[in-house]
Amino acid sequence: MEDARQALNKLNMLMYFMFALIGVGAAMIIVGVMKGILFLWIAGIVVMFLFLVFGIPLVWVRNSERRTNLRIAVFILGYDDCTIEMISGSCGISVNEAWGKVKWALNAGYLPGYVINGTHVCLAKLLDPNLQEHAVECPNCGASFTYVGKIGQCPYCGDYYPPQNKKN
C-alpha cells in the first residue's frame, strides 16, 4: 500500500509538471517572437492554451477531493493522538466532513495502526497495553533495551523485565 505522503507528493508533482509545461509554452512564444519563427510562436500559444484551459483545471478538479483526503491523512500521521476538532480546524472543514475523510483514509489503508476512539484518532498501541513499547534499563546487567507488551526480555543477559519472582 502506498504511503499517504508519497501519494500526496505524486499529486503535487503532477501539478508542478503541468505548470512547467506552461513555462515551456511561454518560452516557445518568447523565442518565436524574438526569432520571428511563426510556427514556434503558434505552438507556444497552443501549448499554453491547452494546459491553462484544459490541463490544470481537469487535474485540479479530478484530484481535489483525493488531495484533501491525503492532506488529512498526512496531518494525522504527524500525531499519535489527535481530535476530530484538530483535524477539521487544520483543513478548514466541518467536523462531519472531517469524519468522512478520516474514515476514507482508514479504509484506503493510509493510516496503518490508527483507530477511531470516540472523538480521537489515535494509534491502536496507545489503547492496548500489549502493543505499547517500553524503553527500560535491565536491573541485572544495566543494558538499555525496548520491548513491546507487558513483559520484556533483556537481549544481553536474558533476564526478564519487569523482574519476575524466581522459583527456588
Image: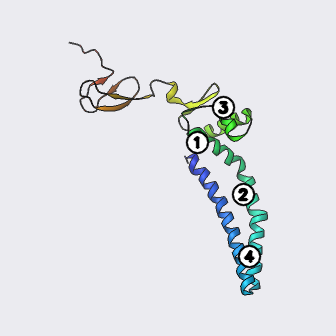
Answer yes or no: is residue 74 visible: yes
Q: Residue at x 74, y 63 (%)?
A: 55
Crowdedness near tag 4: few (<14), some (14–19) or many (≥20) residues, C-alpha within 10 Å? many
Answer with the quarter of the image where residue 121 lies.
Answer: top right
Badge 4 amino acid: Gly
* Alpha carbon separation for disc pair 4 and 1: 40 Å
> Of the residues under marks 1 and 2, which one precedes in the sequence?
2
Query: Is 142 placed above or below 110 here?
Result: above
> Of the residues under marks 2 and 4, which one precedes in the sequence?
4
* Alpha carbon separation for disc pair 3 and 1: 17 Å
Badge 3 amino acid: Ile
> Of the residues under marks 2 and 3, which one precedes in the sequence?
2
Answer yes or no: is residue 103 visible: no
* Residue matched to label 3: 84
* Residue matched to label 4: 44
Q: Secondary structure at mark 4?
A: helix
Q: Residue at x 71, y 86 (%)?
A: 35
> Of the residues under marks 4 and 3, which one precedes in the sequence?
4
Nearest to the observer: residue 88 or residue 67: 88
Query: Is 22 placed above or below 123 here?
Result: below
Q: Check contact, mark 1 vs mark 2: CB within 8 A.
A: no
* Residue matched to label 2: 59
Crowdedness near tag 3: few (<14), some (14–19) or many (≥20) residues, C-alpha within 10 Å? many
* Alpha carbon separation for disc pair 1 and 2: 22 Å
The tag on residue 110 is 1
